[in-house]
Image (cartoon, rainbow, N blue to C red):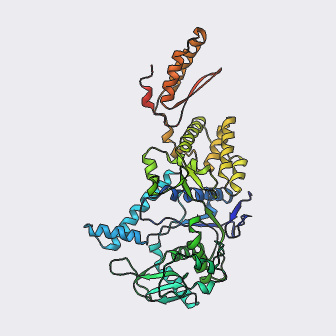
Amino acid sequence: MTTIKLHNTRTRTKEDFVPIDPDNVRMYVCGPTVYDRAHLGNARPVVVFDVLYRLLRHVYGPEHVTYVRNFTDVDDKINATALARKQAGAEGTLEQLVQERSDETIGWYLHDMGALGALEPDQMPRATRYIDQMIAMIEDLIAKGHAYEAEGHVLFAVDSWRDEYGKLSGRSVDDMIAGARVEVAPYKKNPMDFVLWKPSDDELPGWESPWGRGRPGWHIECSAMSYELLGESFDIHGGGNDLMFPHHENEIAQSKCAHPHGEFARYWLHNEMLQVEGKKMSKSLGNFFTVHDLLDQGVPGEVIRFVFLQTHYRKPMDWTEKKAREAEATLRKWRALTAGIEPAASAAPAVIEALADDLNTAGALAELHRLASDGDAATLLASARVLGLLEPDMGAWAETDGVDLSAHADRLSRVRAEAMQTKDFSEVDRLKAAYLAAGLEVRMSKDGVELVPGAGFDASRLEGVE
């Protein structure tokens, strides 16, 4: 069996992945807060952990892997959107409008991530459906002396976990307090104590609890849902490195205090952030866009995925238009090469070896390039699909809409042959320029002429080429 090596954030080393139970490999990834469309940075962990999910399924078998990714549908931004709709005259209670907004946004998210070739996880729990489990966990933490009630709030007492708190992110509690940007509240015993439960007024969604009507804090959600679906010990916990502190640090504290005999997550994986043209993505710089924006602009989801895979998940990724154009051209070539071909029985061993080495997707892509150069279409197809590329339902964008490119290639070939005799290449240059302008790559060799759709191919531009 293939040995998978993963960089464990908790130990800061690359380790052999040894599942708790090979027949039940379990992974939890923090999902989105569903208040708006997913921006491009939100998509990176989706693709990263989709590749890991595919690798685990390849090694252990699809029936032996459970992937959970949650939806946070309890959030002040969702509440604000629903309240604005209510004030604008929308029918229904605030709770109903919150659910409508969440349903709408979840639908957008699944559509956009599906366009990137991401498989849907085995479980996609919504926080609002696990409120009872959150309340039970909070009650248990209070009973064990790890949490306390104050003015309608319940807070986790960091001092009760002081020796362990901060080990994931490599910070001490004293250092965190010194440099913390945390809510200053008179009811906190320690500035680092974080909210497990908070009160809700009549204009906010809420649930009845032993501490009054309220709603859960963000961190308790994942602890309760992962416990219910994966147990007190599971294999992998993932997310963006912006979640390492405080979210993941707080999850560890809550979960290990509530279930001291469990490991919670054995391996922690964090992906780096995304940039656009070398700069941090932000609305103020005008380089902020959603996945939906790119899809609407005609950038295929498969191209977006390919660009993501070119950079190792633990390195910052830079999205550029140049990379997108090159990715589109490469995928067109590969799709042309594998058209009508049945995939090989198995992927190339070198591709699996690269992915098993801490998800070295760049190395796996390099092997795909080699297979394409060798003309091994069947193995290329099988190997690409392990990466979520060249899937049959993702190739409509690369189709040439029935354009007879062979006729154009034959014409250029005839004109070229005549030019070789007359030494007048003006007509060859004219046709070549027209085909290039249409987005075709012109390949001329002693064996003949080949026209290959490239980035930005537009079949309508061939209509006037005579």
Determine whether, in the image, residue 191 is placed left or right of residue 261: left
Q: Which of 415/391 is in front?
A: 415
- Quadrant, the C terminus: top left
Residue 151: percent from left, percent from top: 44, 89
* The residue positioned farthest toward the left in the image shown: 89
Residue 69: percent from left, percent from top: 54, 65
> Which residue shows up at 69% across the image and 63% down it?
7
Q: Is residue 43 above or below residue 402?
A: below
Residue 2: percent from left, percent from top: 73, 57
Q: Which of 23/218 is in front?
A: 218
Q: Is residue 78 above or below residue 456?
A: below
* The residue positioned farthest toward the top in the image shown: 422
Q: Which of 281/314 is in front?
A: 281
> Which residue shows up at 53% across the image and 23% down it?
432
- Quadrant, the N terminus: bottom right
Residue 138 appears in the picture as rendered: yes
Quarter of the view holding residue 75: bottom left
> Which residue shows up at 54% across the image and 54% down it?
275
Residue 340 appears in the picture as rendered: no
